[in-house]
Image (spheres, helix red, strand yellow):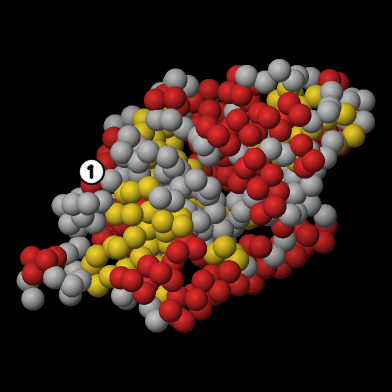
Amino acid sequence: MNGAAQVAGEERKKIILLGAGGREFHNFNVIYRRNPAVRVVAFTSAQIPFQEDRSYPVSLAGDLYPDGIPIVAESRLADLVHNHRVDEVILCYSDLSHQQVMEIASRVLALGADFGLIAPGRAMLRSGLPVISVGAVRTGCGKSPVTRYLCRLLREAGRHPVVIRHPMAYGRLDIRAVEKFQRLEDLDKYQCTLEEREEFEPLLRMGAPLFAGVDYEEIVPLAEREGDVLLWDGGNNDLPFVWPGLEIVLVDPCRAGDECSYFPGLVGLLRAGIVVLTKVDSASGEELAEVRRNLQKFVPDTPVAAGRLALRVDDPEAIRGKRVVVVEDGPTLTHGGMAFGAGVVAARRFGAAGIVDPRPCAAGSIADVYRDYPHLEKAIPAMGYSDEQMAHLKETLEAVSCDLVISATPVDLPSLLDLSVPVLQVRYEFEEEGKILASALKTFLSSTEQGQ
């Protein structure tokens, strides 16, 4: 049967792409957008709030989808499969335990559809420039500080890195196909959420050319014009969208065992050209030993670098003796599974009189976050996926009885929320122990120069 007849009829294979506002759109764009033998009947949304009941616009979906593609909550999966007689459901989001992946697979199979995963290389784009990727086995390992560290090393080597960030395709997709960030004002242009600002602001402040968006087939060629090395800054524990010549994967020893029990983190670990142990100063000897045993089991021949995420606090003495409430990076605490981050570490290290429990003051959707993630106790995750949620975050912070807010989100929280309470900023920067990563970068750059 020819392609036109397939498009017009019901013979096209019907699939659903399970997502969380990023990878599913990329897989569609690269693999399915121009494929007349396949019909994507819907994207589903999970992990990230306020993302369902949207549409993947015609401008991105292409000629085979004149009405666009609906984006619905994953909770409606059973109805979608039955109503559309779906043939296959494909998992396209990250930071799931292997147990969770198989639970999803089991539900899909019980509904009568095939369950699928896509091999990494099928959706990787090629670049004519050297490509370095920074990924991780879990959310919250320290990808952003390591990306900034590599930017500095590349500049010291006389190179001009351009950062391509993993998508956070939230809100309006029609204005987000290609996002080029040159100044902080561009964050408003693309209506960036607080979570996007967490990733983008530090790079913009150091003057790094930065691209993100939805359509990476368009983004990569534009990024190539801005420098001589592409630096892929991954999201969650997802895999690169651009084929890397040097694939760096981070492991967090404070969550020993996660490096071999989360999807697609283990896939990334098995692909890694070099592994970086972060937070080595915070992990126990037992945790470090367990991680090294697992690395020896799964990637015995892969070089392993190590480093710490060093705290940067403008005025540590401002913490001493104060009752503080702590705001931490949102995704690290939610689907990253951590109970605290740099803010709580700073409060303890610099002598806070106490960390106030914010939960009794949690407003609206922030209260929902504590319900959905009961492991959270001492910190407020910096959640801001909508204007309403930003308002709830502000209301929560101003309702807590404390002397000081410690903000460990990289964004300028007082300006963004117009807070009346005093705020102290805490940051992380990666400091390598030894020079294994720096040497691997130097060797890679040398090999690319010889290949030219």
Which part of the image, by quadrant, shows the N terminus?
bottom left
Which part of the image, by quadrant, shows the C terminus?
top left
Q: Is residue 280 above or below residue 87?
A: above
Report x, y in % for residue 171.
42, 40
107 left or right, relative to 215: right
The image quarter containing residue 198 is top right
Q: Is residue 311 above or below residue 9?
A: above
- Disc 1 packing (10 Å; few <14; some 14–19; many ≥20): some
Q: Is residue 24 above or below residue 193?
A: below
- Tell me what residue is drawn at x 38 percent, y 62 percent: 17
At mark 1, the secondary structure is: helix
Name the amino acid, label 1. Answer: Ser
Q: Please state which of residues 347 and 160 is positioned toward the viewer in this rendering.
A: 347
Report x, y in % for residue 332.
64, 47
Task: Confirm whether residue 129 shows in the render.
Answer: no
- Tell me what residue is drawn at x 60 percent, y 46 percent: 331
Task: Confirm whether residue 74 shows in the render.
Answer: yes
The image quarter containing residue 348 is top right
- Tell me what residue is drawn at x 50 percent, y 56 percent: 46
Q: Is residue 86 above or below residue 144?
A: below
- Tell me what residue is drawn at x 57 percent, y 63 percent: 96
In this figure, what is the number of numbered marks?
1
Q: Which residue is mark 1?
A: 59
Q: Please state which of residues 211 and 325 is positioned toward the viewer in this rendering.
A: 325
Report x, y in % for residue 446.
43, 42
Q: Please state which of residues 94 and 439 is positioned toward the viewer in this rendering.
A: 94
Report x, y in % for residue 441.
51, 43
